[in-house]
Amino acid sequence: MSSEYSLSHLSDPDLLSNLSALVARERAATAELLAHIAEVDARRLFRDAAYPSMFAYCVGELHLSEDAAYKHITTARASRRFPMLYDAIADGRLHLSAVLLLAVHLTSESIAELVAAAAHKSKLEIERLLAERFPLPDVLASIRVLPSGVTESGPLAVLPALAELAPEPVGPGELAPGRVEADELAPGRVAAWQPAWPAPRASASSQTHEQNRATRAKVWPLSTRRFALRVTIGEVTHGKLRYAQELLSHQSISGDVAAVLDRALTVLIAQLEKRKFAETSRPRPGAAPAEGHGRYVPAEVRRAVWRRDGGQCTFVGESGRRCEARELLEFDHVDEVARGGRATVDRVRLRCRAHNQLEAERTFGAEFMNDKREEARRRADERRVPAPGAGVTREPPSMIVCAP
Ligand SMILES: [Zn+2]
């Protein structure tokens, strides 16, 4: 232990005053840190460093923990919108958890009053304050009921009416696991991390948090190659699982939920690959190399590009780091289509959305691309249908890929 950490020589008053000074210094540093995160985020510099998102950059490059990255990015974005938060953090009126709680409620009209009301309050006190001001409806008992664990043997219970096999409504506690409201913060896998939830208490808000905690899927490693998965499923899904087990009852895996899940995912992945990446079990033998026209990328080209690039973004930063994104991948024309780019295997590559956009900005200029995106967004709003990104090849959506 170096001498600076040995404090036994300090008097009690000196020790306390040093501690206060350190806390003040840390708050000032935190506000400054947030300002830097917000600026890097706004300039999207994580892309140049070969990361697909600010979250990935904070975890991979800055080595923040997942929950610290989430907390800092969320509070940095809020502070960039409302710069008075920087001051409130720097002078100790608000801690980061307070800003995190307030963030979704802040408007330019309410911010001064809300910051004043939350000043120097604990997280629990702020939760109460928010529950009073922004009350949530009681959580219905019917969606509070958690199905008991799937039993692995025994006769099938009565299946829920299979006619009701419709997608279930997504409640507040059932946001896609591992994502933060479809933001780019989370790595996009089943949640491998969880924000620290507040302690249980008897308000509507706490019920929501508890509901979240109860329903959020979580994966955690048990040993080198084994993982535990905890997931809450609805009655319909439970019925499907039991029905699948019944259909498999003549096979040895029937009672093994993990094996049934693996079988189901294998089928799902094959189906998604077929649909979204034009995978087929039998490519046309001896077919001449295909070439698309305009943005169209023929199935054979997609298949070859997907295999060659290993289902991973091909962007390489100046440091030589290759982007590790395997989700939201797009088929990117090496030569922009608008400038005569051809859709042949050697002129198409996989890029994550962030790096596809970065490339387009480098080619056409960031301002031009922003204008184009704005224009596309406006048109989409008018038509109420998704608009293709102008100048950007947008291809299949998210896809989870197993390691080869
Ligand atoms: Zn990428």
Image (cartoon, rainbow, N blue to C red):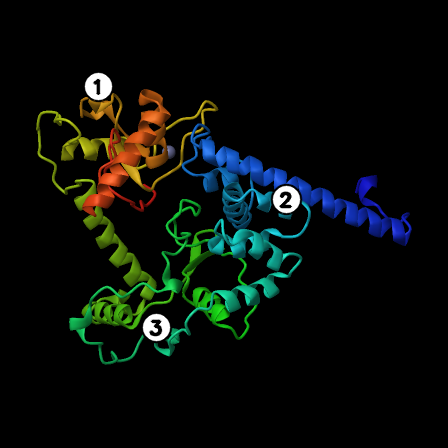
Q: Is mark 2 within 8 Å of ligand 1?
A: no
Above or below, 366 relative to 395 = above
For the residue marked with disc 1, what is the amino acid?
Arg
Kindly report the distance in space between the C-alpha atoms of the residues bearing marks 2 and 1. Answer: 48 Å
Tag 1, which secondary structure?
helix
Q: Is residue 92 visible?
A: yes
Residue 302 location, x and y as percent? 20, 34
Which residue has dot 2 on it?
87
Above or below, 154 relative to 130 = below
Residue 9 location, x and y as percent? 91, 47
Which residue has dot 1 on it?
339
Displayed quadrant of residue 369: top left
Camera-nearest residue between 274 and 327:
327
Quadrant assignment for ligand 1: top left
Displayed quadrant of residue 344: top left
Residue at the spot x=32%, y=21% of the render? 363
Residue 154 location, x and y as percent? 29, 79
In this rendering, would 274 be left or right of 312? left
For the residue marked with disc 2, what is the amino acid?
Asp
N-term-proximal mark, 2 vs 3: 2
Kindly report the distance in space between the C-alpha atoms of the residues bearing marks 2 and 3. Answer: 51 Å
Q: Quadrant of the C terminus?
A: top left
Q: Which mark is residue 150?
A: 3
Depth-wise, is mark 2 or mark 3 nearer the camera? Answer: 2
For the residue marked with disc 3, what is the amino acid?
Val
Camera-nearest residue between 87 and 9:
87
